[in-house]
Every structure is written in structure tokens, then in C-alpha cells.
Amino acid sequence: MLYYAILPVMTLMGAVASFFLKKAAPSGGLVALMENVYFYLGGGLYFLAAVLNIIVLRHLDYSIVLPLTSITYVWTMVIAYFALHEKITLKKIAGVILIFVGAAVIAV
């Protein structure tokens, strides 16, 4: 049960990592990117999420873990809405519902 609890944390870390890398993107050239703290925050969170993924994969079936990582898309939409002020459309809501239904079917 613990490993199922780690999955949402892992997916949230991946979504936040992507957010930080987006914040690092407009930095300019490679040197500016290497000096951008968001680049390291995003990379560090991706690394930690990958470590959690490895731990979870040791204890749960691959055919369960990989589909459940799609929850990352849900976190991404929420972060995009609150932090980047992106609009949530009906298509996005339908997609999130389908992700939840699919994840629930796989998990059961």
C-alpha cells in the first residue's frame, strides 16, 4: 500500500519539475541556462522522481506503475492553471476524466 501512496508524490514531482524547466526555458543561451536556478530545481526533481519510480517498480508490476504515472498530466493541468494562468477547456477536463478512469481501472 505504501508504494501506491508514493505514486502520486512521484507524479507531482515530475509535474513540478516540468514547470521549473519551463521557467528556465526563456533564459537565452546555454550559459544563461546553466546559471538558472530553475534548471537545477527541475533537474533535481526529475532525478528524485526517477529514484522514487525505481523504488516503486521494485515492488509493483510495471503494467500497473506505468499507466498510473499518467496522473502527471492531471498535476500538469492544475499547475498550468494556477501558476501559468492557462485556461482549462472542456477537452482538457474530458482528458483528465479519462485519465482518472483509466488509472482506476488499471489499479483495481
Image: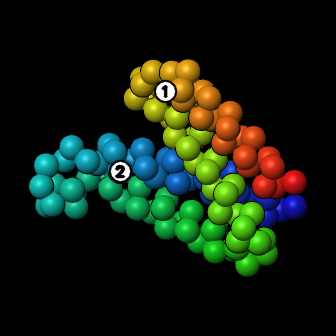
Residue at x 52% of width, y 34% of height: 77
Q: What colour scheme does the image use?
A: rainbow
Q: Which residue is mark 2?
A: 21
Q: In the rendered image of this protein, does residue 52 appear above or below residue 97?
A: below
**Hey, which residue is sitting farthest bottom in the picture?**
58
Residue type, label 1: Tyr
Q: Name which of mark 1 and mark 2 comes first in the sequence.
A: 2
Quadrant in which the C terminus appears: bottom right
Q: Which mark is residue 31?
A: none
Verify CB contact (< 8 Å) between mark 1 and mark 2. Answer: no
Q: Which residue is mark 1?
A: 81
Residue type, label 2: Leu
- Residue 74 at x, y = what percent? 60, 39
Quadrant in which the N terminus appears: bottom right
Q: Is residue 53 left or right of residue 5?
A: left
> What secondary structure is marked by label 1?
helix
Q: In the rendered image of this protein, does residue 40 appear above or below residue 23?
A: below
Q: In the rendered image of this protein, does residue 63 appear above or below residue 22?
A: below
Residue at x 72% of width, y 46% of height: 102
Residue at x 32% of width, y 56% of height: 39
Residue at x 72% of width, y 40% of height: 100
Relative depth, front residue between 83 and 95: 95
Q: Give the quadrant of residue 34.
A: bottom left
Q: Is residue 42 left or right of residue 102?
A: left
- Residue 53 at x, y = what percent? 63, 68
Q: Is residue 82 visible?
A: no
Q: Is residue 92 visible?
A: yes
> What secondary structure is marked by label 2?
helix
Which class describes the residues within 10 Å of circle 2: few (<14), some (14-19), or many (20+)?
Answer: many
- Residue 11 at x, y = what percent? 61, 53
